[in-house]
Image (cartoon, grey):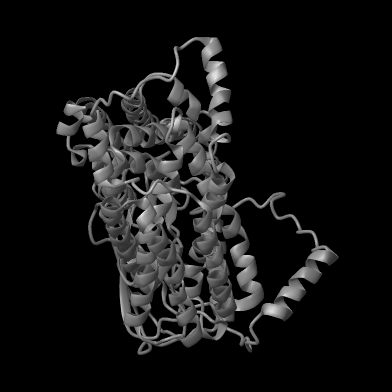
Amino acid sequence: MNSQKKRSPWAWIPTLYFAQGLPYVAVMTISVIMYKRLGISNTDIALYTSWLYLPWVIKPFWSPFVDLLKTKRWWVVTMQMLVGAGLAGIAFTIPAPHFFQITLAIFWLVAFSSATHDIAADGFYMLALDTHDQAMYVGIRSTFYRIATIAGQGLLVILAGLLESNTGLTPLSLEVNAGPQYANEISLPNNDYVIDATDNEMHFFASPAVLEIGTTADPAKVDSINAWVKQQNIANGFVVAEATGTQKVAQEKSSKLGEKINTFIKETFGENRERTQHQLTGNIGVVKVCLSQKPDKGEKVVLNTAHKKGDQSIFLTQGDRFEFTEANWDKPAYITIQIDPKLKEASSASFESTSGNISLAWSITFFVLAGFFIAICLYHKYILPKPASDKAVCEATASNIFKEFFATFVTFFQKKQVWVAVLFMLLYRLPEAQLVKLINPFLLDPRELGGMGLTTGQVGLVYGTIGILGLTIGGIIGGIVAAKGGLKKWLWPMAWSISLTCATFVYLSYYQPESFFIINLCVFIEQFGYGFGFTAYMLYLIYFSDGEHKTAHYAICTAFMALGMMLPGMAAGWLQELIGYKHFFYWVMICCVATIAVCAFIKIDPNYGKKENEEKEIESK
């Protein structure tokens, strides 16, 4: 106990939960970006990478083994080493001929190891800390998990981009200016290849070098140009046409009962809003790209284009990846850049086209990530405390393991108030589970459809920056106050916090304020309230999991937590389309009754999370 007290939680909680978040991002997000850069089709990326989420879905089914065998500390260190080895395996196999199949298999093993690491890390957190420190650091662990998400999606992708830029031809820069001062007429560059003989080195050149786009569009003409560009790029072999095959199957007609339910909900609860026709097609510009020299026989020069800086409301719609070969190098490829139809003021953005060694760049990136994991594994092997309670539940014999495996699930459902606890896990976040699915669409949708009419770039700032800031601050403050007063004292303030702050979206949908500051403030308040209120939810999961099989029981709790977000979220979009944003947010506020109701039935030790309670326990020992 004394040795554990000497080890500050700050020495291992931030790194442990940073290590928990990073492989999840690598598997679910970075893999998608990497495969896209390596030329895998969108269809294959969506189909195969979706299966990578499976280990996190089914992890409660093998969580008992983490509880029964070895220590949680052993599982944490071992899984980190396996994740590091898996990431190194991906780095080695990216240049291989059948890299897609091989790396997918390794990604699945990394996902399995990462999900197992999550089980062990959460269990270790409960064993290594007393209830007061569990409450104190619950916001810190969530914060570093989010930091890992940002680092994975940001820093690692930036590293890969830098490596791409410095391993091939000179990067091609594309400047785009948009605004009402520019002509709205869309002009196509000629489709003739023009030799650029400025030097003898192979390089790419673009026409026009600076693209100017007006803010008023003719949707029919935009669609026509998009179709023409797509046809040209496919015909010249720069891109491969997506196979449709049997995927486009006609959907069955809704049943008469379903139609009646939809009509009843729409007519009874829907808004009486005059829905005007809104064209969601923004204006477009086209850039011609050519290669100056013929590649060697069998050589493939790949050009990847991505948004570099500037307004996110100016975005790439076609031409993110081209393949130039000896067969098509003397033909022009076309990039289309479109603007958000809600963008009315002058703005600009820069795009960069790189033609580096993509395989090498991503191999190095994954080697760096693997090296980090091996280093953090060695660090945790030394720094993680060794709590006396961290031990295997039973002796490792076949009969004992089989017996205890089923006992884990049986004892979970034998806990006091188990069905009240399950209802709490499913319903506490019922309002937020629906709200979170519609925040971005609400902010993006035009005002005549009940939305806020923000541009893509503005939403990135409002929800992606200000919202995350509010969420993080709310979580940290929630952990601090819960550690001072205990979970029972703060349960009701946190329940009201996660409920009442949803009213900010009722306000936004009702008044539709023009002020960008007010929109930011409302989103910050709602996300702060969610972060603050979510603290009570996480602490209750830890509290309810306490006992002999706390690690496995916590994993089961997280499964109910995921279910409580998934099911309401699936129906949220359907309901909003039937009744409109304003009445949908009214419905969200009605759902807050469920949050408050489930809090009324759960029973919590008044001293849980309080420091005074821990001091009394130590004195009694």
- Looking at the image, the residue that sits furthest to the left is 6
Where is residue 155 shown, x and y percent of the image?
Answer: 27, 50
Residue shown at 64% from the left, 69% from the top: 575
Residue nearest the observer in this picture, 392 or 462: 392
- Looking at the image, the residue that sits furthest to the right is 256
Does residue 160 sit above or below 363 in this rendering?
Answer: below
Residue nearest the observer in this picture, 551 or 201: 551
Where is residue 397 shown, x and y percent of the image?
Answer: 49, 9
Where is residue 209 shown, x and y percent of the image?
Answer: 31, 71
Q: Say which quadrant the C terminus sits in.
A: top left
Residue nearest the observer in this picture, 564 or 409: 409
Q: Is residue 358 left or right of residue 267?
A: left
Residue nearest the observer in this picture, 613 or 236: 613
Q: Is residue 316 left or right of residue 447?
A: left
Residue shown at 65% from the left, 87% from the top: 272
Residue shown at 54% from the left, 74% from the top: 585
- Quadrant of the image occupied by residue 207: bottom left
Q: Say which quadrant the N terminus sits in.
A: top left
Where is residue 491 shown, x and y percent of the image?
Answer: 40, 57
Q: Is residue 181 left or right of residue 578?
A: left
Residue 58 visible in the picture: yes
Count of numbered circles in the view:
0
Residue 164 visible in the picture: no
